[in-house]
Structure formats: C-alpha cells, structure tokens
Image (spheres, rainbow, N blue to C red):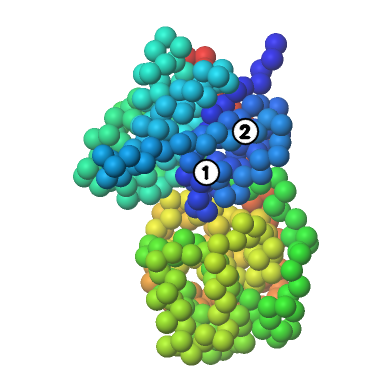
Amino acid sequence: MNNKLRIGISCYPTFGGSGVVASALGMELAALGHKVHIISYAPPARIKLYHPNLHFHKVEVTDYPLFEYPPYSLSLASSMVEVAQTEKLDLLHVHYAIPHAVSAYLAQEMLGDNSIPFVTTLHGTDITLVGNAPSFMPITKFVLEKSDAVTAVSNFLKQETLNFFKVDRDIAVIPNFIRSDLDDCSNVNIRRSTIASDNEAIIVHISNFRPVKRISDVMQIFSRIRKEKPAKLLMVGDGPERAPAERMARELKVQDDVYFLGMQLEISDILRLADVLLQPSETESFGLTPLEANACCTPVICSNVGGLPEVIVDGETGFLLPVGDVDAMADKALMIINDDELRRKMDKAGRKRAREVFNAARIVNLYLDIYHQVLSG
C-alpha cells in the first residue's frame, strides 16, 4: 500500500518565519517521497524547487479597476480547487489563518462531495496582531473552528489563541524546526577576516525590521558593547525601521562598524561567524532565528517574552532578559564575548538542544501524524 501523500501547502512567500518553515516542511516532505504542491503568488524565499516531488503553482491575482485591492484570497481559493482536482491532493496545509485558512475553507466548500481536509498552522502575528484586530476577529475564529486540525508553533501561541478567540477545540503544539543540513557549525563559506579583525567580536541581528523587533534597542546594545570591546554589527533584513536605525548608528557614532546587509537567502554562514545573536523583540511567538543561531553554534541574547523561553534555555544556550533592558543585554553579550570557555559551552549546548528537540525528522513526523489523523476522520 502506498502511504505517500499528495499535499498542498500555502504560505506567504516572504523571509518571515512562516514562509521559512513552510518551505522547509515542503522540502523535507518531498525528500520523504510525498508529493508537495506549493500554492502562492510567488515561490517562498527559501524554497529549492528542484526536487521531482516538489511543485510550485502560481496564484494569478486579478487586477481589475473595480477592485481597489486585488482579491487575493478568492484567487487563492480558486487555485486551491484547481490544484486539488488536477493533482488529486489528499489535503491542504495552510500557514497563517488570514487569508490562507479562509481560502482553504472556500476551496473545501467549492469542492463539495470531492472536498479535502485542511490543516491550519498558526505562526504568531496572524493571531496576536492580524487576527486580534476587530475586523478580523469573527472570520479568524470561524476558520479556526472550521479547520480539520489546528497547530501552533509554541505553547505561548496556543494559549494566546485560546484566550483571544475562545475556541473550543484542540490545538496541537508543533514547534518550528531546523533543516536537516543546518547544524554543521564548521561549514563556513565566508572568511571571518573579511568582516572583522582578530580582536573584534561579530554581533548579528536578523529580522524584518518592524517596530516589534525593537531595532533601536539593537543599536543601543551594540553602542554599549563597542565602548568596552571592538566589534562589528551585521544587520540582516529589511523593513520600516531600517532608515531610523541607520540614522541612529550615525548619532551613536558607530556607523563605521555597522553593516546593513539587506535580505539574505542563506543566513547560516552569517550565524556561524557570529559571536552573539541579538534578538531584543517586544514579543516573539516562537523565535526561529534564535533557534537557527543555536543550531549554528551561536549563543543568543533575547527578550524573556512569548515563545522565546521555549527555544532558549537561560544561562545555557543564551540569556533571557526583560524587554528594553539594553544595559543588561549588553552586559550579557560582553560576558559571552570575553569568556571563551562560556561561549564554547553555550555553542555546544545550543547545538545539542537544537538537534535533539527541534530536529527536522521529529517535527515532520508530528505533522505527518496530524495529516493521517484528519484523513482518517
């Protein structure tokens, strides 16, 4: 009996955590022999579309003068129906409640007697920001109840969802994971000397540069570090807070030691070079970048909020500190930078935990268990 599945996956094709995880999940499933069909308006940023079991279907969005905003959710639903019929999909797995779960529900209704189940994975801002907006509350609650299964990437996000929407259903917690090829700390394709001299530390921040990431805190922390230790700061990503951060670097007179690298597809080389990752966010539903840092043998300084305590073990794989406490974050970063033994200990502990708790094989099997549960009714 062939137990390989035909799975449709929809996600935002961006550099954010949901797109990264959906891409990695698709590639891992394809490697296991399942047929995976990505349905979105563009290929996800980190997807590698060269596996025979991995296919991309572009959603064509109608640009008609009557519509002030293109109706992407409707176009996505139509594409889901078309792909489900032509590729004989067993189920849909959508990442983000809005709009993907809404589109999946519409597709389910349109398919009628030939309907297929859909699994919704919650990643964070679809619940804590978008879904919590008054205009989205009713429809988000509706699709959460209509999903054949719902998963959340952390216990924190599960509780936030239950508190916000009062849904009476099971939500399985399945954390994000590291790709099976990510945890080789010695495989570095960038020379450290191209970025920093031997006596300089390398600090890294990676995000979408939105206010919730507290980019100004990153600059202040680095300024404090620079007063005590020669260092370089690599700012990876882009977003609305980039220009203010560049101005702040000049105001703090550290602009010569700060490099804004923009969006980067492969961040593992950068993380392997880093002495510390700074992630002083206002909140994080999980913390995929800190996990990837630990997998690449890099300790993390981050806020003690949201799902981050489920990823980082305080004092072992990094440090968890109060939001906005830039002095304490700078002190802990300097502690790691100046203590080779501590840094090596955290490097080893972080990699070990990432490999044991968040490895791809274990997490993908949890998703497969969910798929088989919904298919068995």
Is 192 positioned to the left or the right of 371 in the image?
Answer: right
Residue 249 percent across, percent down from the top left: 47, 83
Q: Earlier in the sequence, mark 2 or mark 1?
A: 1
- Answer above or below: position of 260 versus 27: below
Quarter of the picture holding the N terminus: top right
Task: Please state which amino acid type lies under the numbered disc 1.
Answer: Ala
Q: Residue at x 47, y 74 (%)?
A: 218
Task: Please state which amino acid type lies under the numbered disc 2.
Answer: His
Q: Residue at x 71, y 31 (%)?
A: 52
Q: Which image quadrant for residue 72?
A: top left
User: Do residues under tags 2 and 1 come within 8 Å of each other at their CB atoms?
Assistant: no
Q: Which mark is residue 19?
A: none
- Answer above or below: position of 74 versus 259: above
Residue 75 percent across, percent down from the top left: 40, 33
Q: Residue at x 39, y 13 (%)?
A: 112
Q: Is residue 296 visible?
A: yes
Is 294 positioned to the left or the right of 287 in the image?
Answer: right
Q: Residue at x 66, y 37 (%)?
A: 28
Alpha carbon separation for disc pair 2 and 1: 12 Å
Give the residue furthest to the front. Answer: 65
Q: Which mark is residue 55?
A: 2
Q: Element at badge 2?
A: strand
Pointer 1 residue: 42
Q: Nearer the viewer, residue 84 or 286?
A: 84
Is 143 positioned to the left or the right of 316 in the image?
Answer: left
Give the residue furthest to the left. Answer: 134
Q: Is residue 364 visible?
A: no
Residue 22 percent across, percent down from the top left: 55, 41
Question: Within 10 angstroms of label 2, few (less than 14), some, or many (20 or more) residues?
Answer: some
